[in-house]
Amino acid sequence: MKVLIVLDHSAFFPYFETVVTSLCEDRHEVKVITRLGPKGDEEYRQRMHSSIANHRHGSYEFTLRKRADSRRRLIRRLRGAFDYAVYFREQHTSPQLAIRRLDRCPTLARRLVQSRAGRAVISRDGFLNLYRDLQARIPADQQIVAQVAAEAPDVVVSSPFISPMCWDLEYVRAARTLGVPTACAVASWDYLSTKGAFHLMPDYVLVWNERLAEEAEVIHAIPRERTVVTGAAKFDCYFHLRPSLQRARFCRRIGADPARPYLLYLGSSQNIAGDETDFVRDLSRTIASHPATAEAQIVVRPHPLNGAVWENFDEYGVAVFPRIAERPDLEGSRADYVNTLAHAAAAIGVNTSAFLEAAIADLPCLCVLSSRHRRGQAERGHFDHLLRGDFIETVPDLKGAAAALGEIIAGSDPRAEERERFVESFIRPCGIERPAGRSMADAILVAASGCRSHDAVFAGRLQASERAHAQSHSKG
């Protein structure tokens, strides 16, 4: 069987590395089509994808096409309108983010959706499905159709699919033209609530867990019968990697005192927390003045996309590592990250997926809930996944943080059981010992079994048709 995986840009490959490995080990042919993507040189991207080339049945190309025909402008305008409009659904969990999609929304559509009647219409699931039916009637770009046809895949997998103006979506449109089954993989835990709308209905939607399946159904009117829970393949490596350096040696390397415990500050993205340096200064000084944490120090792990603010940062008792922010995508940077997690006493941050990696590392986690970071916490729907997981100790201010961290340093770990349950339910819901990459590979093979109806899909109609199919199959 041949699987064609189309990624909007190469930075999404770490989400699929163990998926590709699982498929290739089962002797399925896997081809990844992507483009170099933002902020990355070709050598780095080639190294990131080298694991595909190591497999006899794997290959990749940086040949992803953007739609270039006469319908490109129409599609951009439709997508711009609905990427904005979806935030005005009553069901949406992050309505404040609509402003991020404002510049691509045509003026008339903007006025309509902002009205009371417009909000009522966009909140109807049936309206979203009719829009997707309209999108499905737009012919595919013939150059993209030819590219997909030349690969002769048994299934096309697209990711992230939901991000504004991502071009992997057009490969799903092309696959439908060719009668090839399709699946989209929602890349990360925040995409359903922060990135825009579903513009086409693929045969299957792959999500990490039941919470995201529920989010897809509520926010985007994706019938539950279309979604498949696979776990988060991106994190598979963290379940088996161990620290490569002893604590004393690692601390000396990063400029921390080996004789003192360190608290790991997990940086958030620019959109979530902005410039976090003042917050860390305040945190450091509060910790230094509190008797329970006076001996503690802080190690900052900058967010890969928010590293510039830390390059010249200087504060007593705070080490920044790595000083130049990096993604833990390659062997060396990944080992550094594992060492940083393994030797910390606790993790603290605003709102970041690094909390998920900290939970896998069984590291106690803490978060300050305050108006200071309201924009990146209360106004972000995906933050609720962390709160519902109940594995993060939440406090209202820095003094509360120092007191809670002091108890953790002293040996208390009140949320250890919740942390374990969160990892099992959110990251590996198909079994804690089962790599999510394997589960996603199996889901892709199921998707290859055949196309579903591409008409406007209503849950009741879908359930009825699938029941009828099952009954006819059992009779046969």
Image (tube, rainbow, N blue to C red):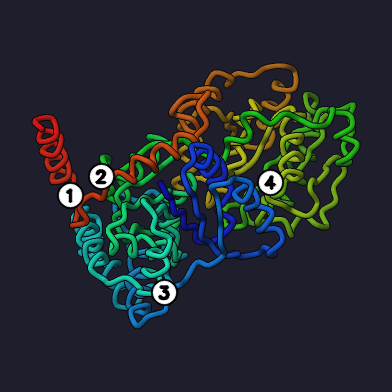
User: Do the CB atoms of the residues marked 2 and 1 lie less than 8 Å apart?
Assistant: yes
- Which tag is nearer the camera, tag 3 or tag 4? 3
- Callout 2 secondary element: loop
Looking at marks 3 and 4 on the same chain, the residue that comes earlier in the sequence is marked by 3
- Callout 1 secondary element: loop
**Which residue lies at the image location 14% right of the left edge and 39% below the top edge?**
469
Looking at marks 4 and 2 on the same chain, the residue that comes earlier in the sequence is marked by 2
Q: Which residue is mark 3?
A: 67
User: Do the CB atoms of the residues marked 1 and 3 lie less than 8 Å apart?
Assistant: no
Q: Is residue 183 left or right of residue 263?
A: left
Mark-to-mark CA distance, 2 and 1: 7 Å
Mark-to-mark CA distance, 4 and 2: 35 Å
* Type of amino acid under label 3: Arg
- Quadrant in which residue 462 is drawn: top left
Where residue 431 sits: x, y (%)? 46, 24
Looking at marks 2 and 1 on the same chain, the residue that comes earlier in the sequence is marked by 2
